[in-house]
Image (tube, coloured by chain):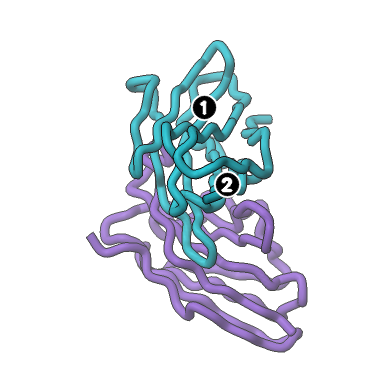
Chain colours: A cyan, B purple
Amino acid sequence: AQSVTQLDSHVSVSEGTPVLLRCNYSSSYSPSLFWYVQHPNKGLQLLLKYTSAATLVKGINGFEAEFKKSETSFHLTKPSAHMSDAAEYFCVRGGYQKVTFGTGTKLQVIP
Amino acid sequence: EAGVAQSPRYKIIEKRQSVAFWCNPISGHATLYWYQQILGQGPKLLIQFQNNGVVDDSQLPKDRFSAERLKGVDSTLKIQPAKLEDSAVYLCASSPGSIIYGYTFGSGTRLTVV
């Protein structure tokens, strides 16, 4: 079965330090992959997407992700965390089959 | 570009009552999705429409949930009768077509069943 695994349910970083949120996928072909962010009591917002073009994808708010086929990973990074980045992040697999959400990673940013 | 509109934002009902949610997708988006997000969990797909036809409703509890998309535009999701475990946020999303383009979510409807 096609799946998406977010390796950490909670990540805590200090403001100004790098962010790394990990996502691995299983697929027999190159999927479409997305990262969404959900702030408390808000809807889901698309951060970035990979659709088999460039493997390094830049998104909004300084986030980026790198598609690594050899590692079946699509980790989300940001060089310097801001307090406003505190939210829940979902890795999502799309394509021509059923859309699959990861279980989410809650990012805490410590002042 | 206007976003995906959902109403109401909040709803509180007693168990065994019925409730309906409304979604207006982005103009021209052929595909519409309803998701259920229980507190602390990721969204779960309930139903996917392509224009006004159902593509996937395998996780829709059809004994109590129903959904329709009239004329391939607006959609309503109904629960009848509601159970306590239906308390969740119901999210609507739309996309131009294939999911490779990503999709846009509405703000959701928070349902509390008491």
Asked if A86 appears above or below A73 in the picture, the reply is below
User: In x, y percent, where is residue A29?
Assistant: 53, 19
Q: Residue furthest left?
A: B1
Residue A74: numbered disc: 1
Residue A62: numbered disc: none
Asked if B25 appears above or below A12 in the picture, the reply is below
Q: Quarter holding the N terminus of chain A?
A: top right
| Amino acid type, callout 1 | Phe
Q: Nearer the viewer, residue A5 or B67?
A: A5
User: In x, y percent, where is residue A5?
Assistant: 65, 33
User: In x, y percent, where is residue A83?
Assistant: 46, 52
The numbered mark, 1 or 2, whose residue comes first in the sequence reads: 1
Residue B106 occupies quadrant: bottom left
Q: Residue at x 60, y 54 (%)?
A: B43
Asked if A47 appears above or below B39 in the picture, the reply is above
Q: Nearer the viewer, residue B4 or A19?
A: A19
Q: Is residue B25 visible?
A: yes
**Distance from label 1 to label 2 (Cα)?**
17 Å
The crowding category of the residue bearing disc 2, from other C-alpha atoms within 10 Å (few below 14, some 14 to 19, many at least 20), is many
Q: Secondary structure at mark 2?
A: strand
* A40 displayed left or right of A54: right
Q: Is residue A95 visible?
A: no
Q: Nearer the viewer, residue B80 or A109?
A: A109
Q: Residue at x 43, y 34 (%)?
A: A78
Chain letter of mark 1 equals A
Q: Nearer the viewer, residue B73 or A86?
A: A86
Chain letter of mark 2 equals A
The crowding category of the residue bearing disc 1, from other C-alpha atoms within 10 Å (few below 14, some 14 to 19, many at least 20), is many
Q: Which residue is mark 2?
A: A107
